[in-house]
Image (tube, grey):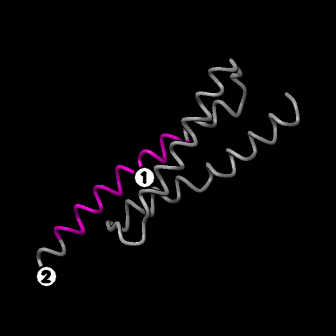
Amino acid sequence: MSVPEILEFLMILSFGISWPLKVYRSYKSRTAKGSSVTFTIFIALGYVCGILSKFMLQSFNLAFWMYWPNIIFVTTDIVLYFRNKKLDEIADSKK
């Protein structure tokens, strides 16, 4: 494994460590207030581009495999955003 591959793996691993925590917080908070779905969608788009580049280069190294849990967690966070937005609407309508 080359140094650039190791650095890419470490970058994706570093980003990936935060996503399970973010998903847990989104799930437990039950509110979309303070969240930016646009930002999260751009993160997901970046991961998709990374995955596609690995397919195009046929470079299925450690970084390639780390993209998958990241995109799953980011997608989960996007789904939770819409769930939480709906819960916010229900709570606001009861006021």
Callout 2: SS: loop
Q: Percent from the top left, x then y, of residue 48?
A: 54, 35
The residue sitting at the right extreme is 3
| Residue identified by numbered label 2 | 95
Q: Residues within 10 Å of mark 1 (few under 14, many from 20)?
A: many
| Residue identified by numbered label 1 | 77
Precedes in sequence: disc 2 or disc 1: 1
Q: Is residue 78 above or below residue 30?
A: above
x 37%, y 64%: residue: 28
Q: Residues within 10 Å of mark 2 (few under 14, many from 20)?
A: few
**In the image: residue 63, left or right of residue 47:** right
Q: Amino acid at mark 1?
A: Asp
Q: Is residue 77 magenta?
A: yes
**In the image: residue 14, left or right of residue 81:** right
Q: Is residue 86 magenta?
A: yes
The residue sitting at the left extreme is 94
**In the image: residue 80, left or right of residue 14:** left
Say which quadrant the N terminus sits in. top right
The residue sitting at the bottom extreme is 95
Say which quadrant the C terminus sits in. bottom left
Q: Foreground residue, 40 or 26?
A: 40
Part of the protein shown in magenta: 70-90
Q: Amino acid at mark 2?
A: Lys
Q: Percent from the top left, x then y, of residue 40?
A: 48, 54
x 71%, y 31%: residue: 62
